[in-house]
Image (cartoon, rainbow, N blue to C red):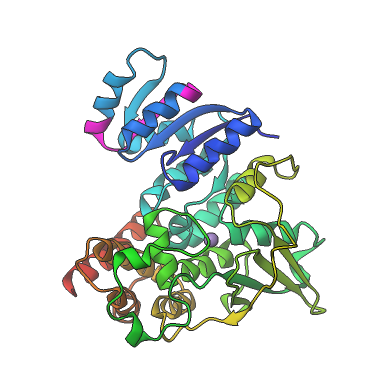
Amino acid sequence: MVHNLSILGSTGSIGTQTLDVARNLDLKISALSAYSSIELLEDQIREFRPALAVVYDEKKAADLKVRIADTDTKVLSGMDGLFEICHDSSELLVNSVVGMVGLAPTMEAIKAKKNIAFANKETLVAGGELVMNAVRENGVKLLPVDSEHSAIFQCLQAAPSDKKLKKILLTASGGPFFGKTADELKDVTVEQALNHPNWDMGAKITIDSATMMNKGLEIIEAAWLFDTDPDDIEVVVHRESIIHSMVEFTDNSILAQLGMPDMRIPIQYAITYPNRVPSPVPEIDWKTLSKMTFYSADDTTFKCLAACKCAMKKGGLYPAVANGANEVANKLFREKKISFLDIGDLVSAAVDQLTVEPAKTLDDVFAADQLARDFVINNI
Ligand code: MN
């Protein structure tokens, strides 16, 4: 089992829950990083005493340096700082950065032959083939932290060869607006969209969950992680979020992974894999779990879902376009500058209207991402 970790994005939802797991398992922390939340980062540094802390924002990094001058923790900033974490002595890097900013550090860590517990789905969506090629060339493990992908990964431990895999059944909670029509979604507020029924997550992913962009990104993520044709990935809406995904074999036998909706289970499994140890997450109470329900997904109302499937079919950098357009549209909605339904319209339009060539280098990925961001800004 891994004994020491570094965390990119330690002040976010996955980051803080990773530290909860680390506290429970008594793991050492080599490095922590945050985008700009230095108050929480300072608390984390005082508790876990990492050798290195990185704040992406340069000015905030300078502030942190003053605040923790009495500790032995070195403070760095920017992408150079994140790269230094990729080369530190930790046995596992937890990448829980939100969004495309995680792509360059992911590639750097892979080149440094570091195993990664992976929660930064946007970078796999955008970087797809380049990231997976680098993973194979460097012989590193990309251990999924996303609950659905952890579930698929856990189910596949029971399969001697993935050759017999027929399809992946990717479960979705459906988010707060499941069953609603486009007309009913016209005027939804940011506050309503942030109110997720089952999972307590960061703001960006909670909005992605409400638009079902999150599930679209996860189809692409699963296609890359498990080398599966996107047509063999079926989204199943499961409102209770008890089954976290399933795999179906060629004989129509299905394996599922179940548990309470608590990210500390998949986070811990990525750290202890292939072992298992006790966790603070409660057991399922079968006396109160009265039913589990299943529905098909509505990708007509939730256009982001259809746009992601379309992007993956078009291949190349179209998933990067879908992701880049969404990152901006999601943010504009949270800033109350566009409506909820605009998000799906903008992501679909970007995938339909832009033209991108397949990626040869990381710079090609960044260029496609920027093209999509500019498209959204120019079309609101
Ligand atoms: Mn997920």
Residue 142 visible to an observer of this rendering:
no
Inspect the magenta stretch and tell me whether residue 66 lies in it: no
Residue 32 horizontal/vertical position (percent): 44, 32
**What's the residue at 43%, 43% (across, down)?**
105
Left-right relation of 132 to 254: left
Residue 84 horizontal/vertical position (percent): 42, 31
Residue 244 horizontal/vertical position (percent): 64, 63
- Residues shaded magenta: 47-60
Q: Quadrant of residue 41?
A: top left
Inspect the magenta stretch and tell me whether residue 52 lies in it: yes
**What's the residue at 37%, 33% (across, down)?**
40
Comparing 192 with 105, the one in front is 192
Residue 340 horizontal/vertical position (percent): 30, 73
Q: Quadrant of residue 127?
A: bottom left
- Residue at the extreme top of the image, as rendered: 70
Looking at the rendered image, the quarter that the N terminus falls into is top right
Comparing 85 with 290, the one in front is 290
Looking at the rendered image, the quarter that the C terminus falls into is bottom left
